[in-house]
Amino acid sequence: MRIAALPMYDFAELGAATNAFWRSIGERLRQAGMDGVPTLLTRAPDYASAWWDPGLILAQACGYPLFNSLSNSNNVPNRPRIVAAPVYSALGCEGPRHSSFFIVSAKSPYATLADLRGRACAINGFDSNTGMNLLRAAIAPLAEEGSFFGSVFITGSHARSVEAVARGAADLASIDCVTFAHLQRLNPDLTARVRRIGQSVLAPAPPFITASTADEDILQRLRNALNAVAADPELKSVNAALLIVGFELVSDADYELSLRLTQEAAESYPALR
């Protein structure tokens, strides 16, 4: 069975747009002669499992856990291939790169990251580039004896991290700027209760990937389909809802930035704590 999965920004309110986006891609792939293109997206709780599925046609992955896994093994089975990186219209993005926003409660006195020493930090997960890795890189110069925060806890999603800061359960969170842009439209009352005090360095946006068995012909068909969908005037509202303005070619080397940040931070601050 062949599968496709687009879980990175799959808010319930954007489900119809995400489905329409995939339908349009799938139609173009079938027209290009690709067999077994699924009609529906796979939406599994363990969305990362799709990245390694030998039947994968297309998925979007978080670059940090994906390439961290690849870097830790010289013989990774079903090694995915990068198709392209999306270009988003969200504030905090530049071309095929995005960043994290460091947020605090709108009512808090904090003005800089240094003000958060000894406070509580919420993260969506320790395997998140925007929620953890980029924040750790920013905190590393401030850490003392490998420690900075009073506590760090996992929320499970960027949206829940924003909620934790908004209600005062956490003092700081690092939020993917694309997610934050979506939340500003979908839940403006929530985002009005927090404010930004900083921004991470830019990093490659979550890549669109395919199975290891994809040859150059399949990669080109996938890229053609993505570019056509992004440029289709009939899909203007769909792309606008998803904040997608295009795609650009990237390589594995582009995602080594996240790993370099990890290695540099690890010299003085190996774990976010």
Image (cartoon, rainbow, N blue to C red):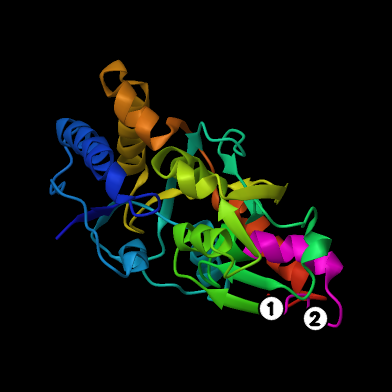
Which range is magenta?
A: 133-150
**Looking at the image, which is closer to me, 66 or 30?**
66
Label 1 sits on a secondary structure element that is: loop
- Residue 190 x %, y %: 48, 49
Tag 1 and tag 2, C-beta contact below 8 Å: yes
- Residue 17 x %, y %: 27, 37
Q: Earlier in the sequence, mark 1 or mark 2?
A: 2
- Residue type at the position of mark 2: Gly
Can you identify the residue that label 2 sits on? 146
Which quadrant would the N terminus be assigned to in this image? bottom left
Q: Is residue 139 magenta?
A: yes
Which quadrant would the C terminus be assigned to in this image? bottom right
Q: Which mark is residue 271?
A: 1
- Residue 47 x %, y %: 33, 64
Establish if 84 lies above or below 53: above
Label 2 sits on a secondary structure element that is: loop
